Image (cartoon, helix red, strand yellow):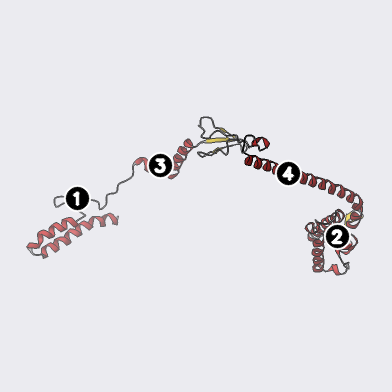
Amino acid sequence: MLVPLVLELIPVLRRLRSHQNYRKKPPSARASSSEQSLLMDFGTSGPSSGSSRPLHVSQSAPASLLKKTRAEMLQEEYAKKQQKQNKVWDKIDQRWVVVDEGKNNLAANASVRPGVASSLPPKTKIKGVKLDASNAVGKSAGVQKAVYARVKEMEDNQNKAKAELREREDKKKNDEAAEDEVRKRLEPKCKAWSEEHGKKKQLRALLASLHMILWAEANWKQVNLGDLLDDKKMRRCYLRATLKVHPDKTKDLDAEKRFIAKRVFDALSQAMTAFEDGNRG
């Protein structure tokens, strides 16, 4: 209620103040003062008009824009983009994907969506160039010599690669055969070391008898069972033992030692897991 009243009183107070200043000035200066007051008066439209005018005239937006919310405008923009997008069906992901102009990375796995023109260029088949002695026919002597040298180098490299592949395959087969033979021979020994009456031994028992299963070159010293009663000492002994038989440390050994190291490492790891779970003895 007070704000409209104050706004109505502002023009009246301005006119009173300008009138008082006008009467104080001499007659020669009243004319110019009257013109300046009319220029500075924002409250009235003229001396004959008693109605007040607003200080600011705001240009309101069209009614069509004011009625639309931001969500509606975003939805319209999204719908326009959907109409302009070029989509193809991806057979691998089983979904429609947007394809940019000039890109054909999905041409092999995609089919054009019905009703949408595809901008993908046709896929070109790349053919390799075969290099053999026939390429030297009709060429100069220098070119023929270079072609023959290149062909011979390629054949030598191919034969070398084939020989290396056969060597690796033969070595793999020999290693597998050796491991099978070692498994048949050492499996009972490893089982007797890691199990007792059909149950797996606990960690302290395995560490105390580790010298009985490891090979002589491992340089493992026997550990007394009494020293393993302390948890800290037992953990230190476990870490030393796992370092001795870790697969990264034994990969260059022979098949028999690798097999023993693998069985010991697995048994110690399982026993430590049981110890951590609270199954202590």
Crowding at dot 3, Cα within 10 Å, few <14 / some 14-19 / many 20+, comes out as few
Whether the residues at callouts 1 and 4 have beta carbons within 8 Å, the answer is no
Q: Nearer the viewer, mark 2 or mark 1?
A: 2
Q: Earlier in the sequence, mark 1 or mark 4?
A: 1
Q: Nearer the viewer, mark 1 or mark 3?
A: 3
Whether the residues at callouts 4 and 2 have beta carbons within 8 Å, the answer is no
Q: Amino acid at mark 3?
A: Lys
Residue 29: quarter of image:
bottom left
Task: Please state, as top left, top right, bottom left or bottom right, where the N terminus lies in the image.
Answer: bottom left
Residue located farthest toward the front when viewing the structure as drawn: 141
Crowding at dot 4, Cα within 10 Å, few <14 / some 14-19 / many 20+, comes out as few
Between the C-alphas of marks 1 and 3, the distance is 36 Å
State the image coordinates of residue 137 (x, y, percent, origin top left).
64, 34
Q: Amino acid at mark 4?
A: Asp
Badge number at residue 156:
4
Along the viewing direction, whichever of 159 and 69 lies nearer the viewer: 159
Between the C-alphas of marks 3 and 2, the distance is 75 Å
Query: Residue beneath label 2, please?
Result: 202
Badge number at residue 69:
none
Q: Amino acid at mark 1?
A: Ser
Query: Residue beneath label 1, please?
Result: 51
Between the C-alphas of marks 1 and 4, the distance is 107 Å
Task: Please state, as top left, top right, bottom left or bottom right, where the C terminus lies in the image.
Answer: bottom right
Query: Residue beneath label 3, please?
Result: 68
Along the viewing direction, whichever of 242 and 250 lies nearer the viewer: 250
Task: Count the labels in the image.
Answer: 4
State the image coordinates of residue 109 (x, y, percent, origin top left).
60, 35
Crowding at dot 2, Cα within 10 Å, few <14 / some 14-19 / many 20+, comes out as many
Q: Earlier in the sequence, mark 4 or mark 2?
A: 4
Instruction: Please name the residue shown 33% across and 42% down the image.
Output: 62
Between the C-alphas of marks 4 and 2, the distance is 58 Å
Q: Nearer the viewer, mark 3 or mark 4?
A: 4
